[in-house]
Image (spheres, rainbow, N blue to C red):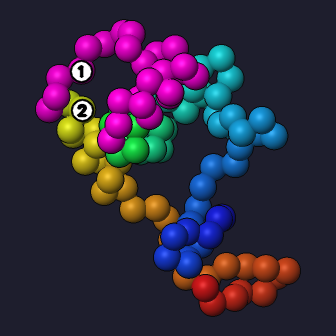
Amino acid sequence: MVPYYDGTNVLCLRETNAYDCILWDNGCTAYGARPVQCATYPFWTRLLSRKFFWNNEKKSCPGIASGKLWTKDEIMNQLFLYEHNDPLHFSKIIREGKIIEN
């Protein structure tokens, strides 16, 4: 769990020490059931907001600007899914065997 923008705790995947996804091993090991954040990448709000962000992301992701050509409607649908993805919030957390209200 990690703190979220609204002060609640949300569930998130751990990353490796190099900040790589723990589900990545020469490809996504959970591709068919990957989280919305992964499934909608790279069509995230920030990356689509400015050409600079898109081009900067392209430097670290060889899949951007190659492969399938997406239509505007497909991209907008991915953006909608990303922006309306509500993380799993926890109202209670367990710390040292005790339930603590969030």
Q: Nearer the viewer, residue 86 or 48?
A: 48
Q: Which of the labelled discs sits on residue 85, or is there none? A: none
Relative horizontal placement of residue 46, taking residue 58 as reference (left or right): left
Q: Which residue is mark 2?
A: 75
Q: Secondary structure at mark 2?
A: helix
In magenta segment, residue 56: yes
Residue 1 shows up from this direction: yes
Q: Which residues are magenta?
A: 49-73
Relative horizontal placement of residue 43, taking residue 99 as reference (left or right): left
Residue 40 shows up from this direction: no
* Residue 88, position as x, y percentages in the image: 49, 65
93 to 86, vertically: above or below: below
In magenta segment, residue 43: no
* Residue 89, position as x, y percentages in the image: 51, 71
Whether residues under marks 2 and 1 lie with C-beta atoms below 8 angstroms apart, the answer is yes
Q: Residue at x 35, y 37 (%)?
A: 50
Q: Residue at x 70, y 48 (%)?
A: 14
Q: Which residue is mark 1?
A: 70
Q: Residues within 10 Å of mark 1 (few under 14, many from 20)?
A: few
Q: Nearer the viewer, residue 15 or 65?
A: 65
Relative horizontal placement of residue 42, taking residue 68 as reference (left or right): right
* Residue 39, position as x, y percentages in the image: 41, 36
